[in-house]
Image (cartoon, rainbow, N blue to C red):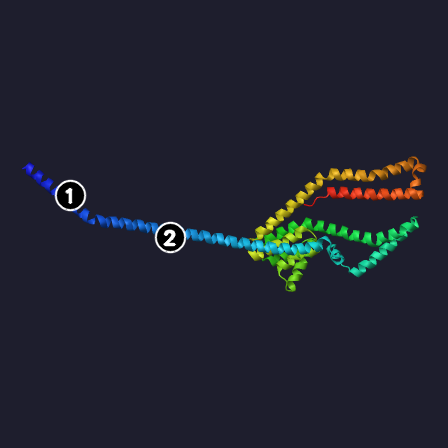
Amino acid sequence: MFGIDTSILAFIALAGCSAGAIAYAFLFNRIADEKNVGKRLEVITRSDADRALVKASRDRVAEVAKRRKSVQDTLKELDEKQKAKDRNTRKPPLRMQIRQAGLQISVERFYIYSAICGVVVTALAYLGGAPLIVLPGAFIAGTIGLPRWIISFKRARRVKAFLEEFPNALDVIVRAVKSGLPLNDGIRLIATESGEPVRSEFRRIVESQQVGMSIPEAALRMGETMPCPEASFFGIVIQIQQQAGGNLSEALGNLSRVLRDRKKMKARVQALSMEAKASAVIIGALPFVVGFLVYLSSPTYIMPLFTTSTGNIIIGCSLVWMSMGILVMRKMMNFEV
């Protein structure tokens, strides 16, 4: 009985396996087709995702290239404008030099003051006992040399004062922009609260806006009244930010940091060149010191240089050669940063 039951169970199991095998044989192609369809769908989905990634990457590259080209075009345009301004900056006309010195006088009045200065210098030379042949030179020096030297001195001092205060003004604008204020309010704040000459330069920007000029154009014109590269940097940064976009506070912050680094570099160069400057001063003063000591010890030995025509010619030639040497040493010691 037990054997019969086992054979029946084995028969049933074999019958079930046979039925499963027959069903699998009939359904094998369908199962394989479904697997292939699933693989194909997976490949298509992956391809679509890859194409989307490639398209997004291509769009980003195109946007970056477009923005880079816009920045390059802007820089090229600004460089051409800057070159045109530099030609006037290296040798600006007298009217612009007076404005850059911070003086509120006309060219005609400057010529009048120059003539008065020439007459005063000539009178002082005559009263000091200078020979008559020296008086025309004194008049020319007093009329042309001294007034223009005063203009140059005041320009340099004004630029130095501007560079001392300008990075602080940029920091104020950066904090104003970060706090949510527009750029106009930051510029007006500097035009009212900052020290001279930064206040005057930013007041010109505000006044230019009131007559319809945009901020970038007014900022670019700062280099006309403030002859230093730092003023031009500010206008270029504002112009690029307007045309190419970007974070204005970050750009101005970077500019402030660059200006402070330039200031540190200038101070370092000046410290390194002090030895050469001291040597130049000693060498330049040595002939005068030796001449004065010789005059104190034996005046009859050195007086022919001043009382005879040959001595005067020797003094004149010596002064010319000394001036050339001083100019060469000055050119070797001055470095543009």
Mark 2: few, some, or many residues within 10 Å (few <14, many ≥20)? Answer: few
Res. 193 in view: no
Image coordinates of residue 233 in percent, x first then y, are: 64, 52
**Residue 46 appears at what percent x and percent y?**
36, 50
Residue drawn at (66%, 43%) of the image: 265
In front of the other: 113 or 50: 50
Q: Is 247 on the left-hand or right-hand side of 15?
A: right
- Looking at the image, residue 89 sits to the left or right of residue 56; the answer is right
Q: Amino acid at mark 2?
A: Asp
Q: Is residue 7 left or right of residue 237?
A: left
Q: Is residue 95 visible?
A: yes
Circle 1 SS class = helix
Quadrant containing the N terminus is top left
- Amino acid type for the residue under numbered disc 1: Cys
Image point (95%, 37%), residue name: 300
Give me the disc on residue 17: 1
First in sequence: mark 2 vs mark 1: 1
Q: Which residue is mark 2?
A: 48
**Vertical relation: 325 (above or below) 151:** above
Which residue is outermost to the bottom? 211
The front one of 333 and 116 is 333
Q: List x then y, in percent, for residue 18.
A: 14, 44
Q: Is residue 266 above or below residue 201?
A: above
Quadrant (top left/top right/bottom left/bottom right) for the C terminus: top right
Q: Are marks 2 and 1 in contact (CB under 8 Å)?
A: no
Q: Residue furthest top?
A: 297
